[in-house]
Amino acid sequence: MIKWSEEQEMVRKTVRDFVDTEIRPHREELEFGDLPPYDLLRKMFSTFGLTDSAKASFAKRIAREKAIEAGEANSDEGEGTRTRDENTVAFSVIPIIELCRVCPGMVTAMGVSMGLTASAIQAKGTIAQKERWVLDLLTLDKVGAWAITEPDSGSDAFGSMKATARRDGDEYVLNGSKTFITNGPYADTIVFICKLDEGNPAADRKVVQFVLDSGMEGLEQPKAFRKMGIHSSPTGMLFLNDVRVGRDRLLGESEEAFSGSGGREASKASFSIERTGVAAMALGIVDRCLELCIDYSREREQFGQPIGQFQLIQLKLANMAVAKMNLQNLVFSHIEMAAKNVPVSFTDASAAKLYAAQSAAAVANEAVQLFGGNGYMSEYEVEQLARDAKVLQIYAGTDEIQISQIARNLLAED
C-alpha cells in the first residue's frame, strides 16, 4: 500500500467532516476536562455504522470459537490464516488519525477501552467471559480500563508490581493500587493485572489478570487527575481493598492460563497493540500541525513579507512534511500487514512507537516555535497539540524503554 485509495479518501473526508462538525465545537469543553468523551465517541460509532459492524464481527468470531470447541471446525483455519480486505483495516485507522487532528486524548480513551481492555479478554478469556464483557467494550456501551501501572512501578511494571491476588477457598481476594489508568474514573469494566500471592517471594509470583466491574465492594475509582495534556482522556487511580471475586472473573477461569511467563507475555502483547497505534495518532497530530503552519506562514507577515519566505521557516515546514511522509508510510505498512495477518514483532512495535512519538513531539514543538508568541497561547491549536504530543513519549513505555528493548533484541539476535 503506497497511498490512500479513492474509496479510502472518500471515507477520510466524511470522517473529517464529522469531526469538524460534531467534535471540534466541543474542543474547549473536552480540553478543560468538563466533558467526558464517551457520548461523542458513541455518536461517531453510530453515525458510521461501527456499532453494527462490531456486533456482526463479534458474533461471527464467537460462533467460530464455539464450533472449534465443539470439534466442528479446525482451529488451524482460524483468524490467523485468513487475509482481510485492506479497506477494513484502513477504515479502523482513519478515525484515529482524524480524531488526533482535534483531540488526541479521545483516541487514547477509545483505544484503551476497545483495544487494550477488550483484547486482553479476547486473548485469555473463555467464551463465556468474552460474551459477558467483550461486545459491550467493542461498541463502547461499556467503558474499559486496563490496569497495570502502579505508583512505585512505572517502567518496571512487573518487577515492582505489588498488587496481589490471594486464594481464599473458591474465591480470590484482591488488593493493591493502580495509577495513570486511562478511563479509570469512568470505567465500567476493568482488567486488573496483579501477582498471585502464594507466600512465595514477590519476584517469583505468577502474573494473573482479573475482570472487575465498577461498584464492586472494596473498589474505589477516584476523580480524574489534572495533567499536562490529552485532557479529553480521563486518567485516574484505582484502589482495591479486599475485593472478593470468584474464579469466573479470572481470565481463562484457570491459573494455568498464566503458567510460566504467560501473564507477562499476555500483557506484552497488549503493549504491542498500543504501540503500533501510536503511529496513526502521531500522523494525525503532525498532519494538523503542518496544515496550521502552512496557513500561518502564508498569512503572518514580518519585515514586510510573509514569514514563509524566510528560509528558516521553510526548513521547519520541509522537516514537518518529511515527518508526515514517514509516518504515513508506517501507517500504510501497518494496514498492509494487518490485512495479511502478518504479526508485528515486539521490537518492530517498539521501533515504530519510538519514531512516531519523537516525530510528533518534535513537529508539535516546532509548530509552537513557528507561531512564536501566538503559539504559546491556548486559543491557538498548536499549543494544545504540543502538550498532547508529549504523552506519546511516555505512555505505553517511555522512549528510554523502547530504546532499551530494541537494542536488547538486536544484540540477542544471531
Image (spheres, rainbow, N blue to C red):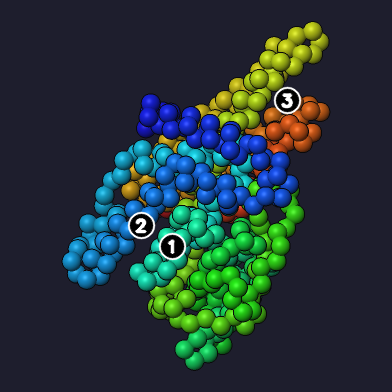
**Label 1: few (<14), some (14–19) or many (≥20) C-alpha neighbours in 10 Å:** many
- At horizontal 53% and vertical 66% (from top left) the residue drawn is 189
Upstream in sequence: badge 2 or badge 3: 2
Marks 3 and 1, how far apart at CA: 45 Å
The x and y percentages for residue 51 are 43, 50
| Residue pointed to by mark 2 | 58
Choose the circle earlier in sequence order: 3 or 1: 1
Q: Quadrant of the N terminus?
A: top left
Q: Is residue 242 above or below residue 119?
A: below
Q: Amino acid at mark 3?
A: Leu
Disc 2 marks which amino acid?
A: Phe
Nearer to us of marks 2 and 3 is 2
- Residues at marks 2 and 3, CA–CA distance in whole angstroms: 47 Å
Q: Is residue 229 visible?
A: no
Q: Which is more toward the observer, 406 or 78?
A: 78
- Quadrant of residue 183 within the rendered picture: bottom right
The residue at which mark 1 appears reads as 134
Tell whether label 2 touches label 1 (CB within 8 Å).
yes
Which residue bears the numbered disc 3? 370
